[in-house]
Image (cartoon, coloured by chain):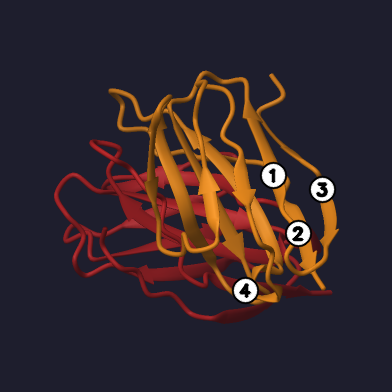
Chain colours: A red, B orange
Amino acid sequence: LAKTTQPISMDSYEGQEVNITCSHNNIATNDYITWYQQFPSQGPRFIIQGYKTKVTNEVASLFIPADRKSSTLSLPRVSLSDTAVYYCLVGTSGGSYIPTFGRGTSLIVHP
Amino acid sequence: NAGVTQTPKFRILKIGQSMTLQCTQDMNHNYMYWYRQDPGMGLKLIYYSVGAGITDKGEVPNGYNVSRSTTEDFPLRLELAAPSQTSVYFCASIEPDVTLNTEAFFGQGTRLTVV
């Protein structure tokens, strides 16, 4: 699986837009990009998945440039409840799919 | 659907004791995983299974065993508990399909302390 690199931590304030970028230089042609959110004392929760260009759902947007070597998770107008760790994963569901988690990005939203 | 259910939620073990962490999913997923998460770290894969009767080691399998006799259940066994196994354990499942879905569903975790 392609290795990912993302910032260890980020700080923001309520109402701001937060963008978390993940680098995955060795992403394979069949790999998808998936983001998870984890609150303290809970299991990770799927946020969004994409292959190329832009994907948007009710929670976030995912921007993927043409070369797919990076991706950016965008959280619009964050609130205190968005304080969590965010993980970027790449991989394909073909064959033996193993979700591989790095340390993630710890986002703290301040009042 | 209950999703992925883990029991117990908390447990304290003495060094050398054994226990089984239970994991059940009701989504008919073929792929199941066990992870451990130490404070401030990401999740490390212990074992995984791609279907009933098939299991394989992950990154940190030492000190653990698994079995997968049914699609629904994927128990994790600790035979001789050690302080290094103090961690939070998460079970997850996924059903990769023709849409290349990669959404994994996680249980709420089991917090294990070995003293």
Q: Crowdedness of circle 4 by 10 Å Cα count: few (<14), some, many (20+)?
A: many
Q: Which residue is mark 3?
A: B9
Which kind of residue does numbered mark 4 sit on?
Ser
Q: Chain of mark 1?
A: B
Classify 10 Å Cα crowding around label 1: few (below 14), some (14-19), many (20 and above).
some
- Which residue is at 72% across, 59% downward? A39
Residue indicated by mark 2: B17
Residue found 59% across the figure and 28% down from its top: B73
| Residue type at numbered disc 3 | Lys
* Mark 4 → mark 2, Cα distance in angstroms: 35 Å
Which residue in the structure is indicated by mark 1?
Answer: B20
Q: Secondary structure at mark 4?
A: strand
Chain of residue at mark 4:
A
Query: Distance between the Cα atoms at labels 3 and 4?
Result: 24 Å
Marks 3 and 2 share the same chain:
yes
Q: Position of residue B66 (x, y in %)?
A: 52, 42
Residue B57: image location, x then y, percent: 39, 52
Look at the numbered disc 3 and give the secondary structure of its residue: loop
Report which residue position mark 4 lands on: A106
Q: Residue at x 51, y 18 (%)?
A: B28
Name the one closer to the observer, A67 or A27. Answer: A27
Dot label at residue A33: none
Where, by quadrant of the figure, is residue B52 drawn?
Answer: top left
- Count residues near mark 2 (Cα–Cα under 10 Å), then give few for <14, some for 14-19, many for 20+: few
Q: Are marks 1 and 3 in contact (CB under 8 Å)?
A: no
Q: How many marks?
A: 4
Asked if residue A30 lies left or right of residue B26, the reply is left
On the question of residue A41 being in view, the answer is no
